[in-house]
Every structure is written in structure tokens, then in C-alpha cells.
Image: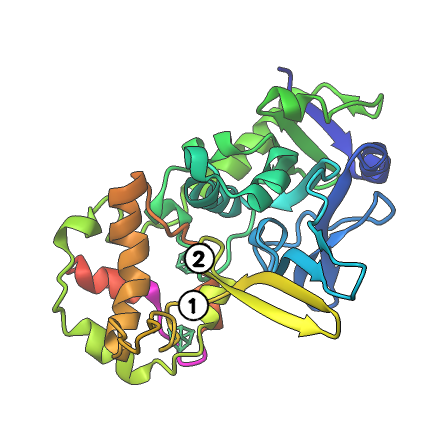
Amino acid sequence: MADKVIAKTDLRKWLAGMAADHDVIAPIGREAGPATWKDINGTQDIDITANQMVMAAKEFLLPVHDVLFRFHTRKGEERLEVPDLTNKSTVMIGLRLCDVRAISVLDAVYYNQGPFRDAYYAARRDKLALVAAVCDDPRWSCFCTTVGDLKEWKLGADVLITDLGDKIYVQPVTEKGEGLLQGDFFSSPSEDDVRKKSEVWANLLALPKRPFAGKDISKIVSWDDPVWEEQARKCIGCGICTFMCPTCSCFDIQDETTGSVIERYRCRDTCQFSDFTMMGAGHNPRPEKKMRVRQRVLHKFKYQVEQFDLIGCTGCGRCVESCPVNIDIRGIVSHIAAEPL
Ligand code: SF4
Ligand code: SF4
């Protein structure tokens, strides 16, 4: 598979070509703010240098409100309505390598589960192609290189794109990705293009690692560490950290009735809410906030390591930036590793 370059002035043509056969979801920059995802249908310019999106790729794979089925109860018209899962294929363009990795974590939970594969997730995932942008300006909160190997993570993408200024360096990673690189606006990269692309990669890989890099937190973490109580005193239990997290995937199922229609939908839930583990008989195995604070960290750095052999945190920094009381998971993990932040 051969690398290519495309002039930024031709980007719209590429997107329009892809939009003929796919839904194209891309970051749309907001004035003076971080970008958000939108189905652009190939009709808009995209800002691939928009840095990391506020909302991660799970916005598409695990929508906030995901209708599982509706039951129509009007007399004589009773019927079950199941959403059409034969989606058009979708190209997600501009996500970062941390979000590519986050999809691998979600896949472990929803997709790679043999007979327990989630049909709703799978319908979207089966036809999803990932065009990932290599970060040229990591945010202050990023710590991806501390928790993973970006050279491995990039293999989860179908295409890699690197911003070279007036053009974009395009690397197909999979055959699916190579199929997206059609058009006479692509050309072969020059030696200078290759050098610039390598510099962006080298800068990203040189991102300072946190002192806990490489430490197996799953083996050294203590269930009774006072850090859980300390952090719980600050935590207000809002759940924003998990809502924003690209790998957090816990959900609730709700039934709602609107007149003659009963709708069952899946929505997000969070281990930070006190009723998350409440059982029907009234027992709650995690009644104290320190237990819920502990759960969020252990789920990512211990349970998913033991269950899937991967760290459930991608170092995207969203929880660090969004916590209203400045709880910083990097500080908690550093403390566990007995290292300064
Ligand atoms: S725990 Fe925080 S830094 Fe890690 S993936 Fe989730 S939001 Fe990102
Ligand atoms: S965002 Fe901060 S305050 Fe809110 S639940 Fe998470 S750690 Fe607690």
C-alpha cells in the first residue's frame, strides 16, 4: 500500500467522493472552541488540525440515546418496531490515535465477545472506517504515550493522515482504508513530505511520559489505599469524567411510554452515581463515594487489564479537563505507583 499526499485545497473533493458511498463524520470547528462531530456529507471543509474532539468516537458507536425497539399498542395496530441496523457504511475522519485505541477498548466489551456481541454496536462498527489524524499539538492534559504504544495503536486505524501545512500526508493502513484513497488529486509524496511527516511523528512520540509509564498498576494497587477517601472528599459524584471518557461504556436500559408507543432505549450510566449498583432488593455493594472513586480507576487500570489485557485508559485527558473539582487521574495513578505526578 502506497503513501500519498493531497493538497488541502482538494480536501473537499476527497470528502465529496467518499460521501457518495458513505456517511462521512468529521470534526467541525466551533469558533474559538474545540471541534465537535458532525455528518458532513462531503459538503463542508473540515478542520483536521482542530486538535482532539470534545466528544469521543463513542458518540457514534454508543449514542447517548439508543433506541432498541418500540412497541406500538394501538388496538388493531400492535407491532414491534426494531431499528434498521443495515446502516450505510460510515467514515469517521479526524479522530486522534487515543480515540482509535478507545474503540479497541469498546470493541473488547461490545464486539469481541463471540455469541454475546452487541448487535447495535456491531451494526455500526462493521461498516465503520477510521481515518485518524496524527496529533501535531497534544493538549496539556494528554498522556497517551504514558499508557500505550502509539505505533501499535495506529494499526487500529484504516488510514492515517498527517497535517503538513498546505497538504496532508495520507497513509493507508488497511485495505478498507486504501479503498478510500481514490481520485486523481492524490499524488506521491516527495522526500520533503516524508521528512515532515516523520518529524510530526517523532514530536508526538517524544511527548513526556508520566513517571508511572510501564508500571503494572493492576498488581501494585491497594484496595485500602487512603487515596480513595482523599479523592472522595473532593468528588461531587457528577459523573462527567465517565460521560466524557472515550472508553467508559456502562449503560442503563429505560422504558418510556408516549401515548400508544412504548420505547425501550439504552442510555449512558456511570459508576459514579450512588444508585448505579443499587439492586432490586435494596442492597448496594458500593454505597460509599470512596468505593465509586476507586471503581473508576480500578476498572481502567486493573480489571480491564486482567480481563482484556489492555489498559482501559488512553490518556486522552478528557476527564482531567472536565472534572469540576480538578480530580486528576494522572495524580491518582502516580500516587499508586509511588511516583510524583
Ligand atoms: S480515564 Fe480520563 S484520560 Fe483515561 S481515557 Fe478516560 S477520559 Fe481519557
Ligand atoms: S468529574 Fe470529578 S467530581 Fe465529577 S464524578 Fe468525576 S471525579 Fe467526581
Numbered circle sitting on residue 270? 1
Report helix, strand or loop for mark 2: loop
In the displayed structure, 244 sits above or below 302; it is below
**Disc number for residue 248:** 2
- For this view, does 244 lie left or right of residue 190? left
Ligand 2 in which quarter: bottom left
Q: Residue at x 62, y 26 (%)?
A: 171
Asked if residue 314 lies in the magenta stretch, the reply is no
Q: Main secondary structure of the magenta part?
A: loop
Q: Are marks 1 and 2 in contact (CB under 8 Å)?
A: yes
Pick the residue in front: 311 or 90. Answer: 90
Q: Residue furthest top?
A: 1
Disc 1 residue: CB within 8 Å of ligand 2: yes
Picture coordinates of residue 293, whole percent (x, y)? 29, 71
Does any atom of ligand 1 lie closer than 8 Å to the CB of label 2? yes
Earlier residue among tags 1 and 2 = 2
Q: Is residue 210 visible?
A: no
Residue 285 rendering spot, x and y as whole percentages: 24, 71
- Asked if the magenta segment contains residue 329, the reply would be yes
Q: Which quarter of the rendered picture does the C terminus lie within?
A: bottom left
Residue 166 position by quadrant: top right
> Residue at the spot x=44%, y=59% of the render?
250
Range drawn in magenta: 324-330
Say which residue appears at 86% left-offset and 35% top-offset: 13
User: Could one spot residue 316 in this view of the protein?
Assistant: yes
| 12 left or right, relative to 181 | right
**What's the residue type where badge 2 is placed?**
Cys
**Residue 53 placed where, x, y %?**
60, 57
